[in-house]
């Protein structure tokens, strides 16, 4: 028996109306999308900080930092370092 708790009250999912089940499905979808977007935002923040450090190093030292070639397939899916 699957249940959901809302404001401290437990409900049996099987007894919910079709409309309520649809709303629950929509809520679960939104929650998963928010989690996905938060993970993407964290990855973008990390990249932003790396770009900022590279800019600072270039300005302070007058040279561009050495980098390994990086190939990224999608955001966070794979990273390949070529020697």
Image (cartoon, helix red, strand yellow):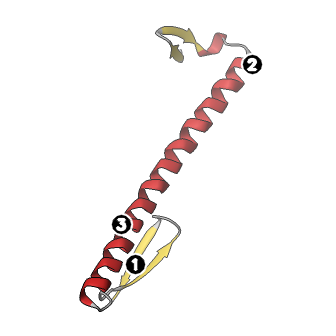
Q: Which residue lies furthest to the top in this view?
A: 9
Q: Earlier in the sequence, mark 2 or mark 1?
A: 2
Q: Residue furthest front?
A: 60
Quadrant hosting residue 22 = top right
Label ID, residue 49: 3
Q: Which residue corresponds to the image point at 37% horizontal and 63% vertical from the top-left?
A: 46
Residue at disc 3, secondary structure: helix
The foreground one among 7 and 77 is 7
Please tell me how crowded label 2 is: few (under 14), some (14-19), or many (20+) other residues with Cα within 10 Å.
few
Instruction: Locate the C terminus by quadrant.
Output: bottom left
The picture places residue 24, in percent across and down from the top left corner, at: 64, 25
Which numbered disc, 3 or 1, marks the residue closer to the eye? Answer: 3
Which numbered disc, 3 or 2, marks the residue closer to the eye? Answer: 3
- Label 3 and label 1: CA atoms lie apart by 20 Å
Residue at disc 2, secondary structure: helix
Residue 23 to residue 46: above or below:
above
The picture places residue 80, in percent across and down from the top left corner, at: 40, 78
The picture places residue 62, in percent across and down from the top left corner, at: 29, 91
Residue 64 to residue 25: above or below:
below
Q: Which residue corresponds to the image point at 41% horizontal and 73% vertical from the top-left?
A: 79
Q: In this view, does 51 lie to the left or right of 13?
A: left
Q: Which of marks 3 and 1 is nearer the N terminus?
A: 3
Residue at disc 1, secondary structure: strand
- Label 3 and label 2: CA atoms lie apart by 46 Å
Q: Which of marks 3 and 2 is nearer the N terminus?
A: 2
Query: On the image, numbered disc 1 is attached to which residue?
Result: 80
Quadrant hosting residue 47 = bottom left
Label ID, residue 18: 2
Please tell me how crowded label 1 is: few (under 14), some (14-19), or many (20+) other residues with Cα within 10 Å.
few
Q: Which residue corresponds to the image point at 35% horizontal and 66% vertical from the top-left?
A: 49
């Amino acid at each position: 028996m699957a249940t959901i708790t809302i404001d401290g009250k437990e409900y049996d999912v099987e007894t919910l109306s079709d409309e309520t089940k649809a709303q629950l499905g929509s809520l679960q979808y939104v929650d998963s999308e928010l989690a996905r977007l938060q993970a993407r935002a964290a990855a973008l923040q990390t990249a932003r900080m790396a770009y900022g450090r590279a800019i600072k190093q270039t300005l302070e030292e007058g040279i561009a930092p050495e980098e390994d070639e990086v190939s990224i397939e999608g955001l966070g899916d794979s990273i390949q370092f070529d020697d």
